[in-house]
Image: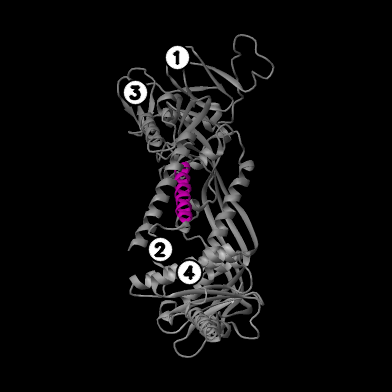
Amino acid sequence: MSKRLLTLLLVLSLVMCLGVTALADNDTARLTDNAGLLAESEIQEINSLLDEISSRHDFDVTAVTANTLNGLTPLQYAENWIDNSGFRTDRIVLLISMEEWDYYISPTWGKASEIFTDSGIRYIGDEFVPLLSRGDYAGAIKAYAGLCDDFLTQAENAPEPGTVPAAERSILPGKGAIILSAAVGLLTALIGTGRMKAALKSVRRKGSASDYVREGSLRMHASDEVFLYNTVNRTARVRSSPSSAGHSGGGGRSGGGGKF
Amino acid sequence: MELQEYKCPNCGGALQFDSAEQKLKCPFCDALFSVSDFEKNDEVLDETEETAEWAAPAGEWQEGEADGIRVYVCRSCGGEIVGDENTAAASCPYCGNPVVMMGNFSGELKPDLVIPFRLDKKAAMASLEKHLSGKRLLPKIFSSQSHIDEIKGIYVPFWLFDAGAHADIRYRATRTRHWSDANYEYTETRYYDVFRSGDLAFDYIPVDGSSKMPDELMESLEPFDLSQAVNFKTAYLAGYLADKYDVSAESNMPRAEERIRVSTENAFARTVQGYSGVQAEESHIRVTDGRIRYALYPVWLLNTSWNGEKYTFAMNGQTGKFVGDLPMDKGAYWRWFGTLTGIGAAVTYAAALLLRIL
């Protein structure tokens, strides 16, 4: 009897160990909401979105939120979370920290930093920061996911990764061109009709008597030019300042973040 | 007042000054007579001014209506020629006989100079057509609907001023210099006080001496070429209308002075060279009077009416310059405005599109 119990216990613990190992083998959910910013349904929705993108591109797109960084820098926190999570080597993580309202995107090294350059990260950041500022965390993460998808798709298709997705540059000129066209149109019309209107009017006073000046009668008796004083003004030259959104780090690393 | 007539010695027809020939021509027998043939008639002008007499017209006139109206009796046909106190030359409306009211030219009223007509009535009509063509905003029916009410060749009295101007003008002038080094961009401005004092002379500045002729219209016809001016002889007036002046030279002087001032300031400002900015600070201009002459200048006057409004056109009878304000078709204006806006916008948009594609 006790032998059977013992075997049962052993099998159970083995199964449990296996279960635990299996759990350990499973990736952490790609969206981990430690700060409790999202509803259950949103978390599930975003997770399936991130899973789909990640499997399609063979690249982990992940996001984590936190209430406090526990004294770590955003980079350190993000790296720690990744190291403990079992994600692929090719991955990108978005960290949203409510402690001081920071966000951080870290693709780190290798292929990821080639696809997501510093300017690419800045671009992605600019796109979803307004949503973060509004408190639309689900929307922000979804926007981040969509942009990562674009970048990854473009990297697979285009020879030059890290640039702004081609979808942004449509062939039609944007709003600026429309306003300029309207302005030029109005200007042409004003000038054209102004000239036509002026052609109708021919009766006008003669301002001067220049036709009647006796030739060569202009005689100067005195002409003086006296220097009075001078003033010197100076304006400081504008020096271009380097952008500081990204962090400088060791070889191959890339990443960037900011406040929202 | 004595009326002077110009009759053809051959056939008795009414002579008219022909602008093409620059002689008096008889329209009936085509005979030509030079102006000097009638010179001795003008001797009466040098006598003192006669008192005006006029024949009282039949019928009653209201108080004030008769003021200024003069009626003359044509010696050839007895018809009445109606003018005002300024009318100096006219034609009898019945027999076409040209008459000159000698009293309005005698004594101090005798003009010094006259520029004879160089262009005739046909030229005036042709000029009008040219003036109306090519004006995109002119209502299309203006040319067809408007009709010439009257077209008259008239000698307009002008006062011609010769004057000298003495000016002392002070300017504040600046010169600027730019340079830069690694940290700053510099602008140096040097201020100067510039002084000019001198004289300028003017000849024959015309000011309209008739209150009936709009001054703006007459000024628009300038310039008249005085090299073609001749000493006044009444024979030049045959076939045209003429008025004597009713605005004195003194009242016209301010207008001449104003034009002199502007011209002087312009001429002096042109002598201040080599500065980036010039501002006149003090300007004293003294106009010294020279001669004042009285002249008659030739003008073709066309009056039309259209849409209840009167339009006056004038042509310089010597140079042919044609002036006259025209009405604007509002519908056409906005149509053109819209079309041009559309074209301008479309071209700019297409250019932007092309630049994007390239």
The residue singled out by tag 1 in the image is B94
Residue located 59% across and 64% down the image: A40
Q: What residue type is labelled 3?
A: Cys
Q: Which amino acid does label 2 sit on?
A: Ala
Q: Distance between the residues labelled 4 and 1?
A: 108 Å
**Secondary structure under the numbered disc 1 in the rendered image:** loop
Label 3–label 1 contact, CB within 8 A? no
Q: Quadrant of residue B249?
A: top right
In the image, which residues are magenta?
A: A178-198
Q: Can residue A213 be seen in this view?
A: yes
Q: Which chain carries label 2?
A: A
Q: Percent position (x, y) of residue B90?
A: 48, 24
**Secondary structure under the numbered disc 4 in the rendered image:** helix
The residue singled out by tag 2 in the image is A167
Residue located 45% across and 75% down the image: A60
Dot label at residue A50: 4
**Secondary structure under the numbered disc 2 in the rendered image:** helix
Main SS, magenta residues: helix
